[in-house]
Amino acid sequence: MLNRFKSKAINSACLSIWPTGDAVATAVVKPNKKGLPILESCEYHPVKNRAELIDTVKNISETKEYAKLRCVSLMNSEAYQLLMVEVPDVPKDEVIEAMRWRIKDLIGFPVEQAVIDVFDIPDQKSSGDMVYVVVAKEEVIAKRVKLMLGAGFELSSIDIMELAMRNIASYLPENEQGVAMVWLGMHSGSITLTKESVLYFTRHLTGSEKLFGALYSEAVTAEMEGWLDTVIIEIQRTLDFYESQYHEPPVSGVVLVPLIKPVEGLTEYLSSQLGIQVRYIDLENLFEMDANMDREKVALCIPAIGAALNPPELTS
């Protein structure tokens, strides 16, 4: 089920569902006549426990306008591992099976219980070609499939956070020359390095809940700067790895996904420390959306929106 990046894109409306643990986020995206995305809706439903989450997903399935839509479900990053591994010297159709034995010492459970999929990384300077390997426990995937099918959805695929964020980065103007996109979510975050809709590198960020909790302020404070400096180090490490690993010039910019709560001076601080322009994504230029749509809700649903998108070169 972890194979959306291999499947052909379908030029039609898509519903994505992202159960986060304490909420269920949804997004519906459809292409306009030119194939560009329209964000028709996004919803964020807080839940208190697993039973309430199941009921919420079922209630969503009963929404009339969702009944016949293609459906994608998004996994939280803690539900799987994304490993960068040297590709074995075997025929292409045997790579996934060969990967089982290459990763068996890199995961914390028996490889026989693993669901595995692979997607390519572009040309690299290193001697051995590397690929990304997605690994999840079979029972975790089965549980998600049961949730979605039990609610009545016709599940098209299961997506992962890194590719959902890649999809958003694919629509940025910096995508053509390379862009580092930073997402600071309510519970976690990520840095996604993308060029021409290809995911080159991704890095998970922890602790972003502090930004919207104990450290939150309407403007950057000295205390907030201390935490932001750890993010800046991770961004710089990502940029350095990209330049040293791949035959590519430096990225054209760093973009920040809109926050669920505004922080004045954040992009200016990041720019001053990184020595590269940092800007917020302008959601209105990213996709068509109702002018009255709640922007905080959109920010909460960003990963779900990404899961409902297709990279632009796959939409025709």
Image (cartoon, rainbow, N blue to C red):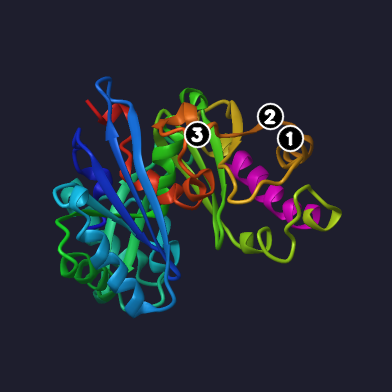
Q: Residue at x 24, y 75 (%)?
A: 112
Mark 2 or mark 1, earlier in chain:
1
Q: Judge left or right: residue 229 versus residue 151.
A: right
- Tell me, yes or no, whether the two marked residues, 2 and 1, touch with CB atoms within 8 Å: yes
* Residue 316 image position (x, y, % from top left): 22, 25
| Quarter of the rendering occupied by the N terminus | bottom left
Name the residue type under label 2. Gln
Q: Which mark is residue 271?
A: 1
Q: Which mark is residue 283?
A: 3
Q: In the picture, residue 46 is in which quadrant? A: bottom left
123 to 217, vertically: above or below: above
* Residue 263 image position (x, y, % from top left): 71, 46
Name the residue type under label 1. Ser
Q: Which mark is residue 277?
A: 2
State which region is magenta. 225-241
Secondary structure category for the residue under label 1: helix
Mark 1 or mark 3, earlier in chain:
1
